[in-house]
Amino acid sequence: MASWNSFPLEITYQTLGWLAFVSWSISFYPQVILNFRRKSVVGLSLDFLLLNLTKHSSYLIYNTVLYFSPAAQQQYFEKYGHEQMIPVAANDVAFSIHAVVLTAITLFQVFIYERGTQTISKISIGIVSVVWLFAAVCVFVALPSHSWLWLISIFNHLAVSFIQVSMTVIKYIPQAVMNFMRKSTEGFSIGNILLDFTGGVANYGQMATQSIDQSMLFIPSSIII
């Protein structure tokens, strides 16, 4: 496994990584707190929550497998070279676990607080069903050849990802449509968006820093916002 060539860049990488982790992690709390204070989730799109849970679950699978699996890491080195570094840091794993837990808590609030006439649309249920059916098919395709790197790349890698990219593109659409129809953002925490953006900038800075140190082309391997 490759090591850092520059100590200052390594420190910068770690700092940006944990800044992204803190920003993204905190971003979940304003909505949870707002729901708790209002004892209501009216104004928060349930479709957004379902799509967001799917997105972060796929990111969790990618991070944990690539960070902890020697087999997946070996396949990564064989594909990209042993001089390269694994593109998953401890803060990535910590964030993805935290994201799934907090999104699940927010979904739990849907069942215990007032939600008015809001329901999860059949379109979102259909999208999520297709996503996980696709993932299941990929598991069976990867099993015979033990293509673990290819399999987890389906969950997150920009070049081939179906799940991560598609969820990132569409997850905010239901919330934006709801805000437009209601002519109001009441019930939806804007703090989530601001912290999301901050974390995204820090994450891309982190990947750029690693690319500069390793003298390789900067191709983002994840989209997390």
Image (spheres, rainbow, N blue to C red):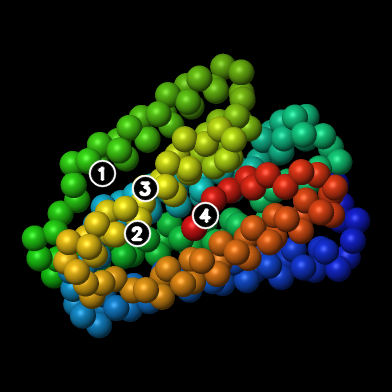
Of marks 2 and 3, the one in the foreground: 3
* Residue annotated with mark 3: 170
* Residue annotated with mark 4: 224
Residue in the image at 33% along x and 32% along y: 130
Amino acid type at image mark 4: Ile
Q: CA distance from mark 3 to mark 1?
A: 10 Å
* Residue annotated with mark 2: 104
* Residue found at the very far top of the displayed protein: 144
**Residue situated in front as seen by the camera: 136 or 182:** 182
* Residue annotated with mark 1: 124
The crowding category of the residue bearing disc 3, from other C-alpha atoms within 10 Å (few below 14, some 14 to 19, many at least 20), is some
Q: CA distance from mark 2 to mark 3?
A: 19 Å
Q: In x, y percent, where is residue 196? A: 48, 66
Sequence-wise, the earlier of marks 3 and 1 is 1
Q: CA distance from mark 3 to mark 4?
A: 13 Å
Amino acid type at image mark 2: Ala
